[in-house]
Amino acid sequence: MSMPWPMFSEAIERLMRSSLVPGGTILVLGGGGDYRQIYPELDRRAEAASLTMLNGFDDALQAGHRDEERDVLCAITRAIWNRLEGLAGDVSPTREALRKMDAADIFDESLAFSLPRFRLRAYRRGPLTPSAR
């Protein structure tokens, strides 16, 4: 697997396959740059787990215009990191890869959080209602 976070990929796959209740939705936030290679793999794994990808999230989103928005994204991102780290075990190789990508702010609370542009993927378990499309 070519992802920079192989241990997390297993945890995400477990969430997609067994932890998501019918009607539940998984939201995946990610950055630009090297992260772009991750989205097709996430889509493939979601499809294999019989999840439906929600439309409308093709364009990069801008974040950080307001301090309170950046703070909310920071809290969500770090909470997700902590949850996945708990599921994955030793993530030191992933931490090192993120440091090399200048993305250590995802987990390192001593660094200022910066997520100027990001992408969102949304996957849902079960059929879509007309209002959810």
Image (spheres, rainbow, N blue to C red):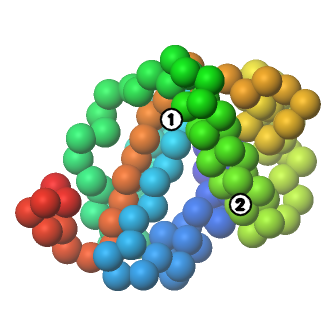
As rendered, which of 44 and 84 lies closer to the eye?
84
Residue 117 lies, in percent from the top left, at 50, 22
As rendered, which of 112 and 13 lies closer to the eye?
112
Residue 4, above or below 17: above
Q: Residues within 10 Å of mark 1 (few under 14, many from 20)?
A: few
Q: Quadrant of residue 25?
A: bottom left
Q: Residues within 10 Å of mark 2 (few under 14, many from 20)?
A: some
Residue type at tag 2: Leu
> Looking at the image, which residue is at 18% across and 68% down?
128
> Looking at the image, which residue is at 60% across and 30% down?
68
Residue 72, above or below 104: below
Q: On the picture, is 119 further left or further right than 52?
A: right
As rendered, which of 17 and 25 lies closer to the eye?
25
Residue 2 lies, in percent from the top left, at 61, 43
Residue 32 can be seen, yes or no: no
Residue type at tag 1: Gln
| Front label number (1 vs 2) | 2
Q: On the picture, is 102 further left or further right than 68?
A: right
Q: Secondary structure at mark 2?
A: helix
Mark 1 and mark 2 lie on one chain; the one further toward the N terminus is 1
- Numbered label attached to residue 84: 2
> Looking at the image, which residue is at 80% across and 41% down?
107
> Looking at the image, which residue is at 55% across and 71% down?
15
Residue 21 lies, in percent from the top left, at 42, 81
Q: Secondary structure at mark 1?
A: helix
Residue 42, above or below 115: below
Q: Which residue is mark 1?
A: 37
How many numbered circles are shown? 2
As rendered, which of 117 and 87 lies closer to the eye?
117
Residue 47 lies, in percent from the top left, at 34, 64
